[in-house]
Amino acid sequence: MPDAYRKTNIRQVSQHAHSEIVGMLPEGAWISRAPSLKRKAILIAKVQDEAGHGLYLYSACETLGITREETINDLHSGKAKYSSIFNYPTKTWADIGAIGWLVDGAAIMNQVMLTRTSYGPYARAMVRICKEESFHQRQGFEILLVLSKGADEQKAMCQDAIDRWWWPSLMMFGPHDSESTNSEQSMKWKIKRKTNDELRQNFVDMCAEQVKVLGMKLPDNKLKWNEERMHYDFGEINWDEFWNVVKGNGPCNKERLDARKKAWDEGEWVREAAAAHTEKRKNRKAA
Ligand code: FAQ
């Protein structure tokens, strides 16, 4: 395998894995505050699914010749990125709905093409992940649907969550193609099958229709169907905000990394115990 191809896959797959794990944090904050036992059980299952996705992806990454410790160290040192979206706070219960609908929705839009990515272990992990993410998206939409039919306060909460998550969700697809440093090469290697702007457009087209079912509005007064292009036109993303968050200065970047480092440090004895157990079993088999 050419070294540059291997390194690009390590970069993308490990950053994807980190995103799944860091992505547990904003939703995890609502497990203890979910409005009913049923909602709590569903949210716990969803957050566990994200942990599973992170684990498949770390395993896929290890097949490229890097250890899990190395990838995690790169996250903690700030060398490796994770998706900008997880640096925003979850202020109300409606945010859990908006994350499911918009964030999982954007993730699926991107990941469906990755089921055909050229590196087999990554593509195979994506097949299962996409199935689970589709369920996540529906549960998020259903949370918003219930709120959209509720009291005035619930409707307002639903609209407020959509207003706050819409633009950061569009940023998940990355910079414009003209600014995307990795796209051209990744498209040639068939790691990426669609460009950042193509996927973002598909996502806007999908959400512009779905939001009508909620009776809500997307916060973009430039959003308009363009008959010639057969796509929705939409407003410009605030790229200063995007790069600011990517560089570590978003509302929750510090909190998220601190939480991951703390979990890693506090889990050291578990990793040691698991390694000792494996060693003991290996020795027992050999004897
Ligand atoms: N945030 O040249 P490009 C999820 C960086 S999973 C932060 O266009 P590329 C599940 C990019 O890394 C969500 N950084 O890069 C869930 C590069 O810097 P580098 C994650 C970003 O790789 C749901 C630089 O900017 N999904 O949500 C972002 O060709 C709910 C230039 O960009 C994946 O990771 C960003 N948004 O395209 C969990 C999918 N965008 O690395 C919990 C796999 C760009 O050279 C709850 N990844 N950058 O230092 C991909 O498809 C690609 O990596 C892109 C970026 C499309 C994200």
Image (cartoon, rainbow, N blue to C red):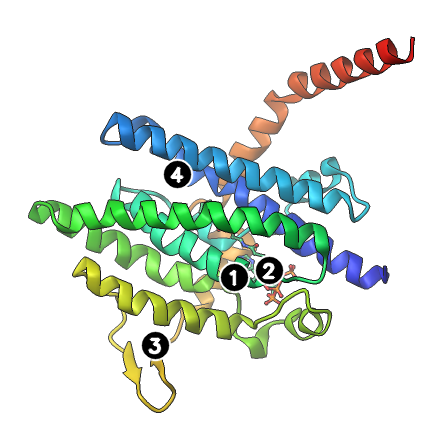
Q: Which residue is mark 1?
A: 110
Which label is found at residue 114? 2
Count of numbered circles on the image:
4
Is any atom of residue 29 visible in this view? no
Query: Which quadrant does the C terminus fall into?
Result: top right
Using the numbered discs, state the Cα–Cα distance from disc 4 to disc 3 in whole angstroms.
28 Å
Distance of label 3 from label 2 (alpha carbons): 25 Å
Labels 4, 1: front one? 1
Residue 2 vs 253, above or below: the answer is below
Compare marks 2 and 4 and give the one earlier in the sequence: 4
Expressed as whole percent of the image width and height from the top left, the position of residue 12 reads: 66, 56
Image quarter (top left, top right, bottom left or bottom right) of the N terminus: bottom right
Of the residues tagged 3 and 2, which is closer to the observer?
2
The residue pinned by badge 4 equals 27
Circle 3 sits in a helix, a strand or a loop, which is it? loop
Q: Residue at x 31, y 88 (%)?
A: 227
